[in-house]
Amino acid sequence: MTGLRRRISNRMQEPTTTDLSGATRKLVELVERARAVGREQGPLVPVEALVTIERDNWIWQIVDREVLDSLSHRLVFEGANGRRREILMTACIDTAMSAASKIVDLDEGCVLIETLDP
């Protein structure tokens, strides 16, 4: 993801607004760009849970460094009270969007999808 930079203005000015079709077009472009990056990364690798809790037994697991390096997106849940909590990390935008959609359906709040810097 080198070559990408944040678009933060150095000048104070009125925020730019866009209509629904412009916003939809920008979102489609963003999702397509994220999918293209995901295709370039190659096949997905399942990530096991770091810890599994069954009744009173905690089972710790180790994740390979290669798996951690392949992760590309983090899901952060923001509840109604404004508290943020990292939920999980995924290896592609499609998985992140699918998981965020299901989480929002289960609980009211906002799920943010953040990219992980390499």
Image (cartoon, grey):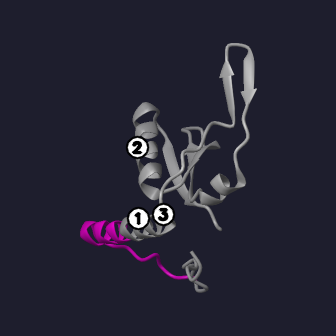
* Position in image of residue 72 (x %, y %): 57, 59
Q: Residues within 10 Å of mark 1 (few under 14, many from 20)?
A: some
The residue pinned by badge 2 equals 101
Quadrant into which the C terminus falls: bottom right
Q: Residues within 10 Å of mark 2 (few under 14, many from 20)?
A: few
Q: Is residue 42 above or below residue 50?
A: below
| CA gap, disc 1 and disc 3 | 11 Å
Quadrant into which the N terminus falls: bottom right
Q: Secondary structure under badge 1?
A: helix
Disc 1 versus disc 3: nearer the observer: 3
Q: Is residue 39 left or right of residue 72?
A: left
Tally of marks? 3
* Position in image of residue 42 (x %, y %): 48, 63
Q: Is residue 27 left or right of residue 5?
A: left
- Residue 42, numbered circle: 3
Q: Residue at x 67, y 56 (%)?
A: 66
Q: Residues within 10 Å of mark 3 (few under 14, many from 20)?
A: few
Is residue 14 one of those drawn in magenta?
Answer: yes
Q: Residue at x 56, y 39 (%)?
A: 79
Identified by mark 3, the residue type is Gly
Q: Residue furthest left?
A: 21
* Position in image of residue 67 (x %, y %): 63, 53
| CA gap, disc 1 and disc 2 | 17 Å
Q: What segment is highlighted magenta in the picture?
A: 12-29
Q: Is residue 43 above or below residue 102?
A: below
- Residue 35, numbered circle: 1
Identified by mark 1, the residue type is Arg
| CA gap, disc 2 and disc 3 | 24 Å
Residues at marks 1 and 2 touching, judged by CB atoms closer than 8 Å: no
Identified by mark 2, the residue type is Ser
